[in-house]
Image: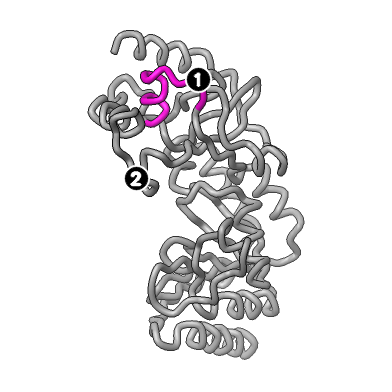
Amino acid sequence: MADFEKKLAEEVEKYNSLSFPVKANIFERAIIRRVPIAKVHPNPNDEFCKPNVGPNYSIISDYIYRIGNGGGFVQTDSAMNSIIVEKIHPNGYMILNGHHRWAAYYKLGRKYVPVKVVNLTSQEDVERLLKASVHNKRVLFDFDQVIFRESGEMENELLFPFNRIYTERIRKGIPALFHFFASEGYDIWLFTERLHSLEYMKNLFKLYHAEITGVITGDKRIPKLNPAVAKSIDDMFHNKYELTLHIYNDKLYWVDRTAKVSKAFDLEDANWSTTIKNIIGEMGKDAKED
């Protein structure tokens, strides 16, 4: 393992302070499916690169076996998934997800690795979207827990070829609910642990004839890897919006910063979107009466 540990240490030292993410254009994101392994760099902020945590060599060995000729993998084997990366300055790509697979390819002596290039939402993206908005209220949806569904009532699958590109299934009634919030003057923000590009998520909802304001992609990574950026984003949201709605599967939280009012409402799964609309209507009436 000494050779690999030396390589990892060199990469971390080289890119720890000199690199930063840059946007990959639509051509790069659509066309690039594999790149020279020399252009793929480990993320110095990831636990994989931390001396006190470090790589799990058992996982690397397992990937070596599965990726190598004797692995006997099947098409759905996670070992064959593309390494998710973002383009960086001064050169190449930084790993967002797939460090142990990258290590396996390196130790196997592979010259190329499969990649998926994404543009995660940046602090600058959030600032730009907030400046462009004229609204002072927002609604927050957790994409992974509220909108995405593997079972239950869902919107119709997208037509070919879009269903091959956008494989997520959307909860039934979400597009209509988004239209409702837009008509009521709300900005619509999504949070997701997924490492999809901002453009990917926006295009997904456009195909369902619904618009969103913005998406925080890989949201759990931001406070973990860069607490200062996470605080800056939170401050921008706080200063922009007077009213915030947090919507979960079974709860709606109404937080009016100006009026210093906070309320929680139960949501019934059977009439989920209708219940949300009724609550917004009633709260709107109460605000006008006050």
Q: In this figure, which residue is indicated by the disc labeled 1?
A: 111
Q: Residue furthest left?
A: 58
Q: Quadrant of residue 212 in the image?
A: bottom right
Query: Residue 157: x percent and y percent?
Result: 54, 71
Query: Residue 182: x percent and y percent?
Result: 68, 74
Quadrant position of the C terminus in the picture: bottom right
The type of residue carrying mark 2 is Val
Is 274 rendered above or below residue 74? below
The tag on residue 79 is none
Q: Nearer the viewer, residue 151 or 109?
A: 109
Q: Mark 1 or mark 2, which has the lower sequence index?
A: 2
Name the residue at 62% across, 62% down: 162
Name the residue at 58% across, 79% down: 177
Q: Secondary structure at mark 1?
A: loop
- Tell me if 163 is positioned left or right of 100 in this view: right
Q: Residues within 10 Å of mark 1 (few under 14, many from 20)?
A: few
The type of residue carrying mark 1 is Lys
Kindly report the distance in space between the C-alpha atoms of the residues bearing marks 1 and 2.
22 Å
| Residue 264 among magenta residues | no
Q: Which range is magenta? A: 101-112
Query: Residue 185: x percent and y percent?
Result: 69, 74
Name the residue at 41% across, 13% down: 9
Name the residue at 45% across, 11% down: 10
Q: Is the C-beta separation of discs 1 and 2 under 8 Å?
A: no
Q: In this figure, which residue is indicated by the disc labeled 2?
A: 74
Is 200 rendered above or below residue 84? below
Q: Secondary structure at mark 2?
A: loop
